[in-house]
Amino acid sequence: MLRRLVQAVQLLTLGVVGACLVLLVIAQPEPAAPPVAMPPGVTIDPVVFGATVYEAQCESCHGKWGEGVYAPVTIDGAASLRAFPDPSGQVEVVRSGRGQMPAFGGRLTDEQIAAVVAYLRQLS
Ligand code: HEC
């Protein structure tokens, strides 16, 4: 009688553990889209790195080459240099947004913002 009870408890435990294992395997959360980030220890020209950030985050509004998907959002290196003699002004727009331009401070690292600004400043 006791032996049966022990077997029943063992079976039940096995079942619960098995169910947990199955849940662990199938109930993994969706992996978040990988952010565009530079692996540690890798050095790369900021303009090259900035181009990858631009393509992922900015191109949809500003166009492949800064030509703008809609009129007011063109980005032109020469105009940028005039409007922002110091890159920090441009970094601020990207970090905090302006008008219809979304803020990227929460989405991109300082390094990514600096790189994408370096990329913008040589677009022409
Ligand atoms: C949802 C569309 C959208 C996205 C995405 C977007 N921008 Fe903008 N951006 C705008 C708009 C609209 C403006 C004009 C803002 C204003 O009203 O002054 C602007 C303005 C700017 C300016 C100021 C241009 C100037 O000469 O005054 C910079 C710099 C800029 N964006 C960089 C970026 C960067 C870098 C990214 C990607 C990290 C990006 N933008 C993504 C819409 C966008």
Image (tube, rainbow, N blue to C red):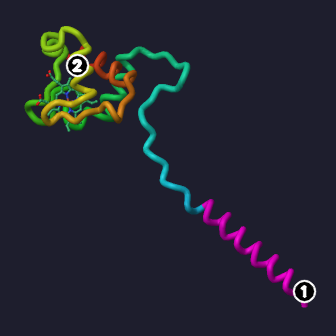
Q: Position of residue 2 (x, y in %)?
A: 90, 86
The residue drawn where x is 66% and y is 66% is: 20
Q: Residue furthest bottom?
A: 1
Please tell me whether residue 29 is drawn above or below residue 117 in the rendered image. Answer: below
- As drawn, is 63 to the left or to the right of 24? left
Q: Position of residue 82 (x, y in %)?
A: 13, 10
Instruction: Please give the range of residues in magenta.
Output: 1-25
Instruction: Identify the element where label 2 is drawn.
Output: helix
Disc 2: CA contacts within 10 A as few (<14), some (14-19) or many (>=20): many
- As drawn, is 83 to the left or to the right of 87? left
Residue 54 — which label?
none
Please name whichever residue, 95 or 116, is drawn nearer the observer in this view of the structure. Answer: 95
Residue 2 — which label?
1
**View quadrant of ligand 1:** top left
Q: Position of residue 9 (x, y in %)?
A: 80, 79
> Can residue 54 be seen in this snapshot?
yes
> Can residue 122 be seen in this snapshot?
no
Callout in the foreground (2, 1): 1
- As drawn, is 83 to the left or to the right of 93? left
The reply to whether dot 2 and dot 1 touch (C-beta < 8 Å) is: no
Image quadrant containing the C terminus: top left
Mark 1 residue type: Leu
